[in-house]
Image (tube, rainbow, N blue to C red):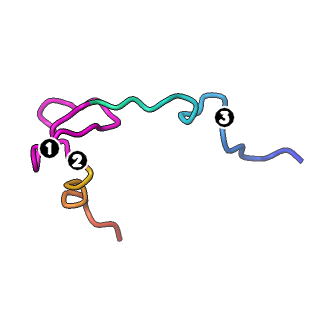
Amino acid sequence: MEERYPRRGPRSFEDRPREFHKAVCSDCGKECEVPFKPTEGRPVYCLDCLPKHRKPRF
């Protein structure tokens, strides 16, 4: 039987390695790496500081 919704398509993000960029945490000043290219003027937070700045999920 054929799957109706295959889990992975031919252009899956899982196939390529994730590219990390060096950044400095806007809160504590610690150097960290993030999986996106930081944009000038927007804050970047390390894994320790990020939870303090996230909106609570309900």
Find disc 1 in the rendering and name its residue: 30
Q: Upstream in the sequence, badge 2 or badge 1?
A: 1
**Does the magenta-highlighted stretch encompass residue 41?**
yes
Q: Check contact, mark 3 vs mark 1: CB within 8 A.
A: no
Image quarter (top left, top right, bottom left or bottom right) of the C terminus: bottom left
**Which amino acid, by three-letter code, is at mark 1?**
Lys
Q: For the stretch drawn in magenta, what is the main secondary structure?
A: loop
Residue at left offset 28%, top offset 66%: 56
x then y, percent, for residue 23: 20, 34
- Circle 2 sits on which residue? 46
- The part of the chain drawn in magenta is 22-46
* Disc 1 element: loop
Q: Nearer the viewer, mark 2 or mark 1?
A: 1
21 relative to 25 in the view: left or right: right
Q: Which mark is residue 9?
A: 3
Q: Is residue 18 left or right of residue 23?
A: right
